[in-house]
Image: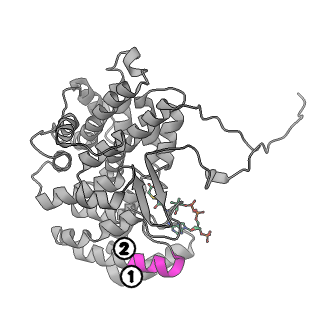
Amino acid sequence: MSEFKPGLDGVIATDTSISYLDVDNEEIVIRGYDLIELAGAKSYPEVAYLVINGELPNHKQLTNFEKILLDDSTFPNEAYEVLKLAPKKSMVMDIIRTGISFLAGFNDESDLMNTSHESNLNKGIRLIAEVAILTANSHRILNNQNIIKPDNSKSFAENFLGMILGHKISSKEAEIFDKILICYIEHEMPNSTFAARIIGSTLSDMYGAFVGGISSLKGPLHGGANEAAIHMLLDIESKGGSKIADKYIMDKLNNKERIMGFGHRVYMKKYDPRALFLRDYIAELESNIQNGKELHKIYKIVEEVMAREKGLYPNTDYPIALLFYLLGIPIPLYTPIFFASRTSGLIAHVIEQHNNNRLFRPRVLYTGPRGLKL
Ligand code: CMC
């Protein structure tokens, strides 16, 4: 039996050609490219195509791909009816999870359970479009707003943000939202990707893997951290703002509380390259709202205190939390948008798992009693 590592810390779970966190060289490798370079130069659909297919698209491939990402012809009206049945106190992540399960039923069993590369690709790419529709409209329906269907005259990011906000957005806002989506797209082996691969390894289907993935990503130690981070910044603002930010964090640290949006299992005491890249966009949006500048000030103080006291740096959820707030995105959608972006990474991983499958079935270090008699 091999050595026991709680939380599988440092354990290599699989081989992959999709992505790798090269912490020493501060690079997130995506199919051979540096994610930050991709985020500076490419759009979400281009990077999604790369993540899923292993190479960047040519013009024709990109045009066809973008068409599918904005196509709602496979999204049945019944799915909107299911969303409307959800209790109003539901969390958006739970409604999306239900929506994904429901959509699975629109595939014949033989198509659903077909794990061939081509079948997975078809189902997966449709799911990118469908999860974006589910994300925006789950929140709209919960808040008694009208349903907004995709507008295929827009880019993926502009359309997605437009469906969420329900009003026209500027090209700068669309551009920054696109970069955020790219930063969330794929990140080696986080808990949700592992969950999706574990499910895929039983030869279960793409939808099932997504349902497992979204349940994992919901947790505050994973995707839920972006919502927790903005709640903290707003709490600091309401209790005195930048004047009390240092003390607020010190009190939390003294109470052994976690500061959400800081720390990372792999980066540990290093800066997440995505957080470094995205923080520069905060200044571009801070005038969008009245309290934007003050929140930015608090943001910087919290970052300084965490570096000074714990030697810990922001992960990507920290700048994204503030950027989403400055974009006017409702807080309950922060984690769902992370998942909507990550669909591309999950598709690539389920395809890779199915193409070279070995069932995940680890062992345990048993610590219970033995030899009890009835
Ligand atoms: N605030 C305060 N202390 C922290 C934090 C934090 N955010 N993160 C780690 N530490 C401390 C922790 O208390 C411990 O200190 P000590 O050695 O003195 O006891 C040390 O750092 C190591 O912590 P750990 O829990 O053993 O490290 P881990 O690898 O299990 O934790 C983590 C990784 C992401 C769960 C953790 O950093 C954390 O809870 N962060 C806050 C939640 C968060 O931002 N999650 C998003 C992660 S990145 C995006 C994603 O994956 O979705």
Image quadrant containing the N terminus: top right
Look at 43% across and 34% down and name the residue there. 351
| In front of the other: 74 or 350 | 350
Image quadrant containing the C terminus: top right
In the picture, the disc for residue 244 is 1
**Dot 2 lies on which element?**
helix
| In front of the other: 241 or 227 | 227
- Report whether 13 appears left or right of 233: right
Per the image, is 182 magenta? no
Residue 72 on image: x %, y % = 19, 31
Q: Which residues are magenta?
A: 301-311
Circle 1 Cα neighbour tier, 10 Å, few/some/many (<14 / 14–19 / ≥20): some
Q: CA distance from mark 1 to mark 2?
A: 7 Å
Residue denoted by label 2: 236
Residue 62 on image: x %, y % = 20, 41
Which residue type carries mark 2? Ile
Q: Is mark 2 within 8 Å of ligand 1?
A: no
